Amino acid sequence: MATREGIYVGGKDIVERYVGDKLVWSKWIRIGSARSINSPRSLNSTTVSMDINNSSRFINHPRYGRGKTKKVKIVDENNNSNVFFAKFAFIGDRYESDGAYLYGLGDHCFIEFETETDKNVFLNNKSQNYTFYIR
């Protein structure tokens, strides 16, 4: 028997369910991965930068940009019980923080967490490979 990957109505994938104007369910959508991560480090109180050697570039899709993403779920591919939540993640060569740009050599994965505690938990449980999902 085939497994069902989502909810479909009229051939369209349903990603949110409302009762009246209240959101009662939303689907986690896989947006990409980052692999061969080197030296995760703190940039500021809530942001982490990681050098990466291989990634799925569609993490930067315009639909998932800053302010459009409700939440990011980050799953450690080596230990699926390590799951972290952030407010934004993207891959690039620079990060804007308080009007200043922080540059890296090559591609970096930047992750903005809600709190400094969330960021520190992530840094204390770092891994080499992550998959990213959004709501």
Image (cartoon, helix red, strand yellow):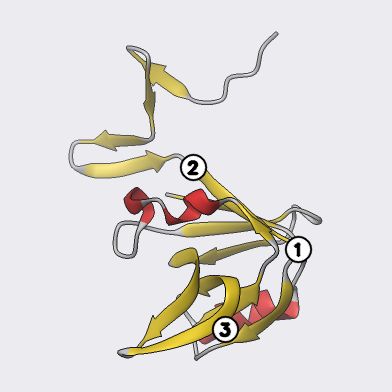
| Amino acid at dot 1 | Ser
Between disc 2 and disc 3, whose residue precedes? 2
Q: Which label number is shown at residue 117?
A: 3
Furthest residue toward top:
1
| Amino acid at dot 3 | Thr
- The residue nearer to you, when weighing 73 against 65, is 65
Q: Residue at x 30, y 44 (%)?
A: 23
Mark 1 vs mark 3: give the one in front.
Answer: 1
- The residue nearer to you, when weighing 21 against 13, is 13
Furthest residue toward left:
21
- Horizontal side of residue 100 vs 51, given as left or right: left
Q: Write down the quadrant of residue 7 in the picture.
A: top left
- In the picture of the structure, the residue carrying the numbered disc 1 is 36
Compute the Cα span from label 1 to label 3. 25 Å
- The residue nearer to you, when weighing 5 against 50, is 50
**Position above or below: 71 against 133:** below
Between disc 1 and disc 2, whose residue precedes? 2
Mark 1 vs mark 2: give the one in front.
Answer: 1
Q: Residue at x 50, y 90 (%)?
A: 45
Between disc 1 and disc 3, whose residue precedes? 1
| Amino acid at dot 2 | Ile
- In the picture of the structure, the residue carrying the numbered disc 2 is 29
Compute the Cα span from label 2 to label 3. 25 Å
Q: Secondary structure at mark 3?
A: helix
Q: Using a 10 Å C-alpha cutoff, classify the residue at mark 3 as few (fewer than 14 neighbours), some (14 to 19) or many (20 or more).
A: few
Residue 113 visible from this viewpoint: no
